[in-house]
Amino acid sequence: MSTAERAPAFAVIGAGYGDEGKGVVTDALADRLGAGTVVIRHNGGAQAGHTVTTPDGRRHVFHHVGSGSFAGASTFLSRHFASNPIVLAGEIAALAQLGVAPRIRADERGLLTTPWDMMINQFVEEARGGGRHGSCGLGFGETIERNLNPAFATDLAMLRGDLGRLRDRFDRIRRQWVPARLTRLGHPGLYLRHRDLILSEEGLERAVALAVGMLAHVDLAGRPSEAVAADTPVIFEGAQGLMLDQDRGAFPHVTRSNTGLANVLDVAGELGFGRLQAVYATRAYVTRHGAGPLAHEQVAPPSPLFADATNRPNPWQGQLRFGRLDLDVLGGAIRADLSDAEGRLQVEPRLAMTCLDQFEGRPVSWMSGGCTVQGPAERLAEAAAAMVSDGNLPLSSYGPSRTTLCNLAAEVKA
């Protein structure tokens, strides 16, 4: 099938620091495109937390599984996604309680997070005290770092190989990689302090069992085309946001992945796509959960109607932070991301603005041209859309219901 005949393709990309509503948008698109849709996770790992609440009241925070699962979409974990067996096991159990048995396929080249990546992440972030980098504590960045060394690398293909080889690799990681990595990070004493936990035999066996247990829920594929048919609608669901991109964010307060189109282009190329619609998601304000710069930061939530049951205070990231949305920064980040696709893929940009329902007639404050602007939420939505796509109206969400979102999304054509 030629690229012109391919089924619709969308990419849902966070335009901020994460927590923009990518799950809501993915769910809405999947509901419109139908149950045959495949949601492709193209970056990040289990640190993603995409909340979807259905019209019938079911609520889930998606970490591995695509946020279109309530709408019947299946999930494909690309080679740019790092799987965490511990988190996946919990997510499968949680979805079962909601009556959802997700269909998951994964590129066997995808990386595998181990408990020791999580330990390093958490031990060091805690030791940093006031100098924290803003980690989620789930070992994603440490997984990327470890896999740069072939002697300690783990990918999904290892799960269907020799079990003894997998156990030996895990054992080498905890005995050799962990102390060397902690020393390189400037915290050699942490290995001795946590040695019993790191070298626990029970922990080793549980790690092996959980890793191999993934195969009960995930089918491995050698390449994307084995998991995604040419006539299948696709939604690339991103994690984190453009302001945390490893190449464009403010180091070291970034994620160890490309959060925009870079990985989408790679996977879309393997699948033979020639065009897609990129839906950039932002709240009507900016949030940041974790350390790092935040322009136009405000002490209090932007509206008395603010609500966020997902982003609770935690030991690794602290409180959710708030700032005014700067349309010049928003437009610049999106245009920089779109430049990656020039000459490679035809991309039609759209904007999804969420959390407008938190204002309900109250004025919103935002930044434009270096000045503070105040006005109704609808005016902000129109101004923001103009920064992205020459005046095309945004996909606008006034609530968690996918029906509401879809009714307002008529301008986004499948």
Image (cartoon, rainbow, N blue to C red):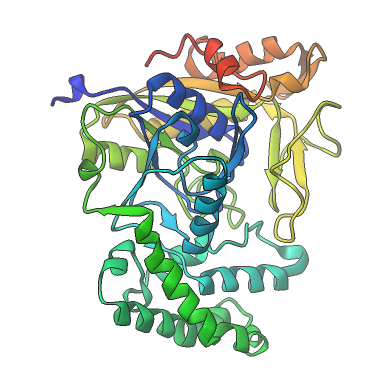
Picture residue at 47% right of the left edge, 43% below the top: 259
Picture residue at 64% right of the left edge, 81% below the top: 187
Picture residue at 70% right of the left edge, 53% below the top: 291
- Residue 258 or residue 272, whichever sits in front: 272
Using residue 395 as the reference point, say whether residue 105 is left or right of it. Answer: left
Picture residue at 22% right of the left edge, 34% below the top: 229
Percent position (x, y) of residue 96? 52, 47
- Residue 76 or residue 55, whichever sits in front: 55
Using residue 398 as the reference point, say whether residue 350 is left or right of it. Answer: left
Above-or-below relation of 81 to 376: below
Using residue 368 as the reference point, say whether residue 49 is left or right of it. Answer: left
Using residue 218 as the reference point, say whether residue 228 is left or right of it. Answer: left
Location of residue 183 (image quadrant): bottom right
Percent position (x, y) of residue 218? 35, 53
Percent position (x, y) of residue 121? 59, 68
Q: Dividing the image into 4 quarters, which one contains the N terminus?
A: top left
Location of residue 263 (image quadrant): top left
Above-or-below relation of 91 to 363: below
Location of residue 167 (image quadrant): bottom left
- Residue 61: in sight, yes or no? yes
Percent position (x, y) of residue 57? 65, 30
- Residue 399 or residue 54, whichever sits in front: 54
Above-or-below relation of 368 to 302: above
